[in-house]
Amino acid sequence: MDVFEYIREKERSIRVRLGRLDFKNTSDSHLRQLSYFISHSLNNTLNNSWVSRIHLILDPAGGRDLQAVKNTKVLDFYHDWQAHIGRELFVGPWMTIDQSRIDRFADVTGDRQWIHTDPERARNESPFGGTIAHGFLILSLLPDLTDTVNPQRPPYPEARMVINCGLNQVRFPHPVKTGSRIRARTSLQSLTPSKRSVEMVNQIKVEVEGSGRIVCVADSVLKLYF
């Protein structure tokens, strides 16, 4: 049992013991405050980022036994890329998001809301002073923005196949006004090896030229097969 699971087990044990005590019906306000304090402290501790960092330091393979991984290509890739965790790996070129691109995306998806496709109305009624790009348009451009779909420059040439497994979370903090130029910055978050593959999680941030604003943040999950 690692430190993280030990804390979890102790937390469960304490909660069971607290549950046996009827603090709510007692007249002693100090006991009620103590119960609240213990519960609040446990939640804060388990949700604190340092707890997960301890877990990763003690078990960098994400709970997996590296001795069970026999594929030397998996091991080589995993060890080579461990040093890059937490670092920025890629900054892409600027891409212009014009009305034509927005309209084509609207045609494909059926999302023709006027804030995206009606420049005249958007100028008069939108708080942004013009049309804006669909959030999902920006999301769909991530492979191109991160240059991961160019067959001439595969980002992980050691892998025989790379599968997009989805996204852990996505946010669109600010809109992208039509005519803006955007680019992506990629940082490696984690690596998890298995017998034939390595799961890679990258955080991708899309920024707008000249404003410093982040318009999309996404944790991309890839599986690299060797």
Image (spheres, rainbow, N blue to C red):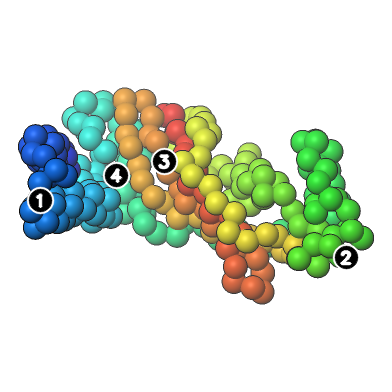
Residue 167: image x %, image y %? 50, 40
User: Please, is residue 212 above or below residue 55 in the view?
Assistant: below
Of the two numbered discs 4 and 1 in the rendering, the one whose residue sits closer to the viewer: 1
Residue 225 picture quarter: top left
Q: Which residue is mark 3?
A: 200
Report how far apart the C-alphas of labels 1 and 3 lie in the structure: 53 Å
Q: Nearer the viewer, mark 1 or mark 3?
A: 1
Pick whichever, 86 or 155, lies toward us: 86
Among numbered discs 4 and 1, the one appearing first in the sequence: 1
For the residues labelled 3 and 4, the Cα–Cα distance comes to 13 Å
The residue at 36%/57% (across/down) is 86
- Nearer-N-terminus badge (1/3): 1
> Nearest the camera: 85 or 21?
21
Q: Secondary structure at mark 1?
A: loop
Q: Marks 1/2: CA distance?
A: 62 Å
Mark drawn on residue 103: none
Q: Position of residue 83 (x, y in %)?
A: 31, 54
Q: Name the residue that disc number 1 marks.
A: 27
Contact? badges 1 and 2 (CB < 8 Å): no
